[in-house]
Amino acid sequence: MSEPRLKTGLWVGAVLRRGEAQGRYGVVLHRGDADAGGVLVVLRGREGFSVLTEVRDGEGRPAWMRGTGAAAVAEADAEAYVARRLRTDSDLWVLEFESPDLLPPFEARLL
């Protein structure tokens, strides 16, 4: 049996409000499927950019992975990663947050 999941559109709205409350302002760069679309989170930090992608760990639990690698990357590299993912999944949501420390404004287990 699968675990209950909040609709993506509702989750996005809540995360944007939470980010704003923390001073980590965010925007929607690409609107995906409101019910079940996946999410990419672009973090704009002091050192560069990082893109988080939703994944499942070895036990099937939700987690996040730095799709662009452990180190910060240039803006062009982050944009290229997002573009590649959107070519294969048009239902994806893409959010971008101001994040000086490259950490998301929501609880996230990073792998």
Image (cartoon, rainbow, N blue to C red):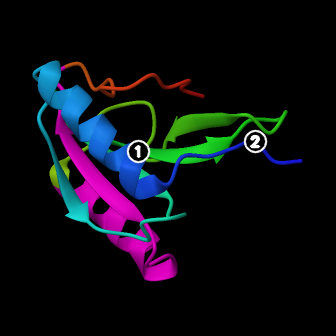
Is 91 magenta? The answer is yes
Residue 46 visible in the snapshot? no
Q: Earlier in the sequence, mark 1 or mark 2?
A: 2
Q: Is residue 34 above or below residue 62?
A: below
Count of numbered tags: 2
Residue 17 visible in the snapshot? yes
The crowd level at tag 2 (other Cα within 10 Å; few <14, some 14-19, many 20+) is few
- Residue projecting furthest to the right: 1
Query: Amino acid under label 2?
Result: Glu
- Which disc number belongs to residue 3? 2
Is 99 magenta? The answer is yes
Q: Is residue 105 above or below residue 97?
A: above
Q: Secondary structure at mark 1?
A: helix
The crowd level at tag 1 (other Cα within 10 Å; few <14, some 14-19, many 20+) is some
Q: Compute the Cα span from label 1 to label 2.
A: 15 Å
Residue 39 rendering spot, x and y as whole percentages:
44, 54
x 20%, y 62%: residue? 29
- Which disc number belongs to residue 11? 1
Question: Which region shows up in magenta?
Answer: 76-100
Residue 43 rendering spot, x and y as whole percentages:
25, 38
